[in-house]
Image: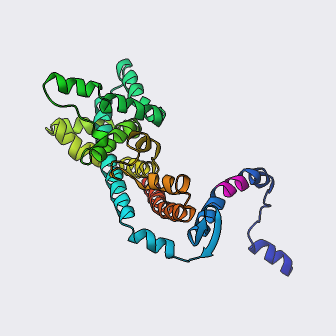
Amino acid sequence: MTLTDTRARRSPHRAKIDLFPYALMAPGLLLVLFATLYPVIFVVQYSLFSTNVYEMVRFVGAANYVFLFQDERFLENLWNTAVFVIVGVALCWTFGLTLALALRRQSWGTAVLRAIVLVPWVTNQVVLALMWKLLLGGEFSPLNDLLRSVGLPPVNPFISLEQALPTLTVINAWRATGFAMLMLLAGLAAIPKEVDEAAEVDGATKLQQIRYVIIPMLRPISMVCIVTLMISFFNVAVLPLVLTGGGPLHATELLSIRLYREGFENFDIALAATLTVFLIAIELLLAALYFRLVKAGAQS
């Protein structure tokens, strides 16, 4: 046996790599990379310069970030966004779980109700905002008609410093409830019927079954649902912009609205880019958490 034969026997068989599928994927991959990487490079670059509209005037390094974190308005925006996202996601998950449990059984009526609950999630946010302004904010809105009928003065929660942010948060949670319900329904469908039957045999009440059996078993899908909603809520801008415009007195001005105003109203591209980088960093952390949860769920 020659030395060449010995090496051929010891070395593993190397299959030829077929480059044709990669060549087919290349145009789409390059387009996706251009559509994602170029805007990121653009905003990072502009966040390090002082600008005159779209013209980069002078390199300032981290000065824009220092200004941003020392700006009291930004801190107020950050607080508003935290309340809007955290409280909104908690309400959305609670509403979604309640509806998922109520519509868990398959029937013609529950299928229709599921479709109805999904309507706000797929409806244009401008339409939803105008609908809620007519229902709650107008002088002759149904809410104010009801208040006048019982002798109370009319209200407008969208111009109240105390009520604007809670009202906006609840409306956005209502809008996304259909998505949470759909994900939790998928999780409920994966729970074997034997689990419910065993809990009933052990004497557990319905509330005990939900608290100690169903919610723990829904934990993987719940975490994925919560992280997905958080990413979505950070990017919501149209609904609050139409409903409140960020007012009154910046009481409902979220980071997304501040970003829009700095970029498209004030044309302060450097500050808008800095806000964008900050939001990208938050969403990258949430995306990393999302993939980690998905991976953990696949391994369990």
Give percent across and percent down for residue 172.
37, 41
Whether residue 239 is visible here, answered yes or no, is yes
Most common secondary structure along the magenta stretch:
helix
* Residue 200 % position (x, y): 19, 35
Q: In which quadrant of the rendered image does the N terminus lie?
A: bottom right
Q: Which quarter of the picture shows residue 199?
A: top left
Q: Indicate left or right for 2 with 297 as reference.
A: right
Identified at 43% across, 40% down, the residue is 242
Residue extending farthest top: 108
Depicted 223 relative to depicted 206: above or below: below
Determine if the magenta segment contains residue 223: no
Q: Which percent across, then down, holds residue 144?
A: 24, 27
Which residue corresponds to the image point at 13% horizontal and 24% vertical from the top-left? 150
Which sits in the foreground, 218 or 76?
Answer: 76
Q: In the depicted view, which residue is nearer to us: 220 or 37? A: 37
Taking 221 as reference, is 148 above or below it? above
Q: Is residue 49 left or right of residue 221?
A: right
**What is the quadrant of the C terminus in the image?**
bottom left
Can residue 31 be found in the magenta stretch? yes
Q: Is residue 1 visible?
A: no
Magenta extent: 29-35
**Image quarter of residue 92:** top left
Query: Foreground residue, 123 or 272?
Result: 272
Residue 284 vs residue 16: left or right?
left
Q: Is residue 19 above or below residue 168?
A: below
